[in-house]
Amino acid sequence: MTAEHVVVVWLGGGPPHQDMFDMKPDAPKEIAGEFKPIGTNVPGIQVCELMPRLARNADKYTILRSVGIKSETWEHGGGQYWLTGNPRKTGVTPAYPMYGNVVAKLRPAPKDVPTFVAFGDIDNHAYGLKQNYLGPTADPIVFQPEDAKGEVKGMLVPPAGLDLSAFDRRETLRQSLDTQLRGLDDPIVGGMDKFQQTAFDLLRSPKLRDALAVEKEPLKVAERYGKNSHGRRVLAARRLVEAGVPFVYTHFESNWDHHGQNFRACKEKLPNLDKAVASLIEDLHDRGLLEKTVVMVLGEMGRTPKINKDAGRDHWGTCQSVLVAGGGFKGGCVVGATDKHAAYVTDKYYKVESFGRTIYHLLGIDPDQTLYALDNRPHRLIGEDTPLIKEALV
């Protein structure tokens, strides 16, 4: 079955894999850290004690422990690598599109819902992803669903005294004013025109407004996801998938770049992540949507094995742990292994290009196809020939 939806839970800054999904309790304390592993509902798989609900749902996801960069020194711009499947640094051409941009280009949604929605800052520690070679027509609609004053949510609710007939007249005026601009055949202007039209279409869409109305969920459901802005975003992501939106990105929590006080930060963040992601996976499974929805939980890097003098972990690119579920990924599976300090891959190493190829494979998108930039230059979707992560696939 070809996956129809993707939900990205982005942990911008780089989450500590040693304190989440690749714990090393027998390592020295300056590496093992403060937390203990607990068993899951799959024998042999353990996760951090702060994630008990994910432990109870391990049969529904796979942990990738061996996908990495093979570079100890890794900066935040590498997040673009993970979200595009291609090597990219800030300011380097071509500016590869992320998965959501490609889906928006190749598989647009019905006009009553957007193809690509982003909750939160998509550029946080993944610099420049909006400036990709596909141009603005493939960009996401970005907003905060919990913010009643948010620009996009405000756009979805007509102001008092404005009925849709008056709005239609405004659109007619806009179209007449834009005639000369459209005649310039400028791709940037064309992209802006599409966004303007999308705004009008979304305003007319009860389906999208209903999907974003997370306050309609029963109190118990809201509490399961977490009564905070991050839980509400993930809950909104589930509702958008149910409404037919193909690609949803949410930046979870403010910053996972724990150079200092890593364990204090994790004590606050991991329980929130546990609630939200476990609830998302459970609900998609119970509604029959998990098998056609890819869920991925990741950041741009892992963290150093050794805890620094500030009780933090620094940047580490050679490996991290990525949670993937649904859409053709196995449940109850771990792919690859790291050494006794969670520093280097010791089994089944895969490049990030393999991760990208695998995502496109599940979406039914040919990773070797050629797409064209705004300047008409051709680019292969995934530039390097790398194998699929077959061990993770159903």
Image (cartoon, helix red, strand yellow):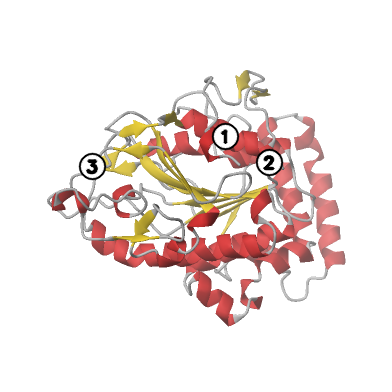
Q: Are marks 1 and 3 in contact (CB under 8 Å)?
A: no
According to the image, label 2 marks what residue? 104
Residue drawn at point x = 68 percent, y = 44 percent? 3
Vertical comparison of 276 with 96: above or below: below
What type is the residue that disc 3 sits on?
His
Please identify the residue farthest to the front as the structure is shown: 43
Q: Mark 3 or mark 2: which is in front?
A: 3
Q: Quadrant of the N terminus?
A: top right
Q: Which residue was labeled with disc 3?
A: 341
| Mark 3 Cα-neighbour bin, 10 Å: few <14, some 14–19, many ≥20 | some
Name, please, the residue furthest toward the bottom.
219
Question: Which dot, 1 or 3, sits closer to the camera?
Answer: 3
Asked if residue 131 shows in the view, the reply is: yes
* Picture layout, residue 228 above or below residue 362: below
Task: Give the distance between the C-alpha atoms of the residues marked 3 and 2, in whole angstroms.
Answer: 40 Å
Closer to the chain start, of discs 3 and 2, is 2
In this rendering, position of residue 45 left or right of residue 291: left
Secondary structure beneath disc 2? Answer: helix
Residue shown at the point (22%, 43%) measured from the top left: 305
Label 1 to label 2: alpha-carbon separation: 18 Å
The residue to which callout 1 is attached is 358
Relative height, residue 165 to residue 121 (above, below):
below
